[in-house]
Image: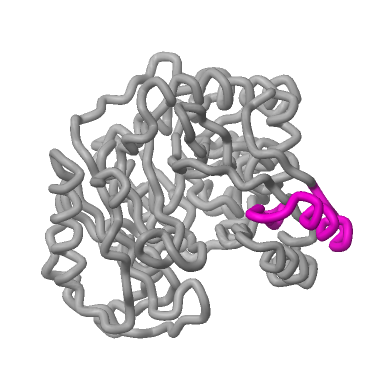
Amino acid sequence: MNILILGSGGREHALAWAVMQNPKCDKLIVAPGNAGIAQIADCATLDIDSGGAVVSFAEENAIDFVIIGPEAPLAAGVADRLREAGILVFGPSEAAARLEASKSFTKEVCDVAKAPTAGYGHFTDAEAAKAYIRAEGAPIVVKADGLAAGKGVIMAFDEQTALDAIDDMFGGAFGSAGAEVVIEEFMEGEEASLFVLCDGENILSIGSAQDHKRVGEGDTGLNTGGMGAYSPAPVLSAEIEARSMEEIIKPTMKVMADRGMPYQGVLYAGLMIKDGQPRLVEYNVRFGDPECQVLMMRLGGQALDLMQAAAESRLGEAQVNWADDHAITVVMAANGYPGSYEKGSEIKGLSALPEDSSNMVFHAGTKAEDGKVLATGGRVLNVTARGESLQEARDRAYAMVDAVDWPGGFFRRDIGWRALD
């Protein structure tokens, strides 16, 4: 089977690594890829947001299966163009991808599905949004309605921060994503992520993870795209997972099917859990990053079989074979992230690190140049390890982190603290 993965981040490196563990993969191309991906697969230059370009490339390269990593190509309808061309694809349609591309759409679907989530208001006018904030008070959450690369969410613990967020969003700080805003009730509890595969009819849970969104240790500082993650998430017990499926995910999938936009792909539900009750924070229509890294480390080669079953509407006959293990990933980010950061600093020491089924460094924002690995993004490396316990996995991951020679980067030393405490 010839496989094409779209994307260039740590998520796509992890997907590529897992796919390569499966013997049915004859050839793997990743577009555009990164320095780490180039070590295990062919990388190609391609406009991944153009359905026509992706279809042409897939036909020219005899691609049997396309796996779409990031949200932007999904929101642009790339999966639709591939299906129309008769090419097997893993990823939801443009219509179904609105579950991530539009927060107001998701809220509307949740209302119909009676799925528990935060109270909210949806606004296209700054003054109306500010009036809502003044009436509700703080803490409160302000979200850009559209895709903002994981950064369009402001958790405001005082009223002025929320009002400033409205000015920023309507002032263009998040581009077109902030042309509309959703303002939500601040939910208390512990957040975790549940990942399920859907084939338009059947739903299969493929595991839980917990991300660390804040840039600073102890979950302090600005929100980021994620500074590390671990799997499984103890807070998402079997009972809470069952409630989440019955009260949130299954009703959502029914509403989507009833609206003529059945969901096919991976659905990532961010959940806030308090007193045993899960409530939906948000949906994402792709694997989380860095949650994908720990899931792929635990799933290995079977990930390809599961994604293919979802794409071929065969999830009813699929099952996940879990080892009784744990995985953790630590993000190494460029100094200054999530603000402005310098690009082009050299990363040394990577070639001496182990690369096997229990230890991997997944590249997120790197490029190879003149025999060197250079940092090109904000989040640059995902240092990932498995172990029989979370502590064992954590010790392995941080041993690798400490062996990386990169003065231009930083990381959190407390990934996994909630579960270990």
The answer to whether residue 166 of the structure is visible from this angle is yes
Q: Which residues are magenta?
A: 122-146
Residue 350, above or below 299: below
Horizontal and vertical percent for residue 73?
A: 60, 52
Horizontal and vertical percent for residue 293?
A: 33, 49
Q: 345 or 117: nearer the eye?
A: 117
Q: Residue lying farthest top?
A: 317
The answer to whether residue 19 of the structure is visible from this angle is no
130 within the magenta span: yes
The number of numbered discs placed on residues in the rendered structure image is 0
Picture quadrant of residue 344: bottom left
260 within the magenta span: no
Q: Quadrant of the N terminus?
A: top left
At 64% from the left edge and 51% from the top edge, which residue is drawn? 51
Q: Is residue 151 left or right of residue 300?
A: right
At 29% from the left edge and 32% from the top edge, which residue is drawn? 302
Q: Is residue 390 left or right of residue 155?
A: left
Q: 230 or 220: nearer the eye?
A: 220
Asked which colour scheme the image uses, the reply is one colour
Q: 128 or 81: nearer the eye?
A: 128
Q: Is residue 201 left or right of residue 307?
A: right
Horizontal and vertical percent for residue 356?
A: 15, 51
Picture quadrant of residue 2: top left
At 74% from the left edge and 25% from the top edge, which residue is drawn? 112
Horizontal and vertical percent for residue 266?
A: 49, 36
Q: Is residue 241 left or right of residue 407?
A: right
At 36% from the left edge and 27% from the top edge, which residue is drawn? 237
Residue 52, above or below 389: below
